[in-house]
Image: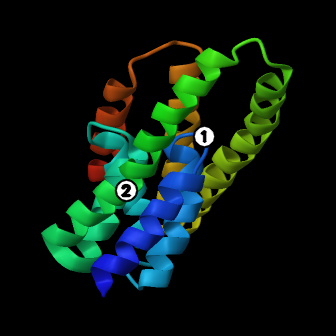
Amino acid sequence: MIYFDLFLAFSKIGLFGFGGGAAMLPVIYEAAKTLGTMDKSEFANLIGISQMTPGPIAVNAATYVGYMSAGLGGALMATFAVALPSFILVTLASYFILKFKESRMIDGILAGVRPMTAGLVLSAVVLMGQQAVTGAGQTAGLISLVICASSFLLTGSKKINPIFIMAGAGVIGALFMA
């Protein structure tokens, strides 16, 4: 039954999760809560792990939730389920977008989806930010804010590779928050 629940939850996420992995995170969190897999703190860890591992964040998060729910079989089912709708929809969308590439309706649909995607990403940022600051002690919360602000500035203005920023944040966390 858990495999069916995982397939149903993650195929819905894959089907209706517009805007990429970060925009899907709030919906993945709700699925994890419904499955009884993890709380906010564990989900914040999932986000960090999903960001650091290679591959799309939504697929990584689905794999992690699936594994926490039902081991290796659950990981495989959740991964397959979250990717399948995208594969089918991208194949269909590519055909129709190429066929109707001059359509004002297609332009209108894409114009409506963009602000919704920004809202979903902002929701994920708020969820992660709350957990980063309130999920730790006072000193760790301050260090979390400094890491967050520094990461934002270093990627936005200095164009430093995010891999180096993740490694640095991990070292700082190990030294000051362990």
Indicate the position of residue 176 as horizontal and vertical percent values.
34, 52
**Colouring rule applied to residues:** rainbow
Indicate the position of residue 160 as horizontal and vertical percent values.
43, 16
Q: Is residue 45 left or right of residue 12?
A: left
Q: State the mark number for residue 61.
A: 2
Indicate the position of residue 30 as horizontal and vertical percent values.
55, 72
Q: Between 119 and 9, which is closer to the camera in this rendering?
A: 9
What residue is shown with label 1?
A: 19
- One can see residue 45 in this view: yes
Q: Between 4 and 88, which is closer to the camera in this rendering?
A: 88
Q: Is residue 119 left or right of residue 155?
A: right
- One can see residue 48 in this view: no
The amino acid beneath tag 2 is Ala
Q: Is residue 168 above or below residue 75?
A: above
Q: Is residue 131 left or right of residue 86?
A: right
Q: Secondary structure at mark 2?
A: helix
* Residue drawn at (53%, 40%) of the image: 20
Mark 2, residues whose alpha carbon is within 10 Å: few (<14), some, or many (≥20)? many
Q: Secondary structure at mark 1?
A: loop
* Residue drawn at (49%, 13%) of the image: 159
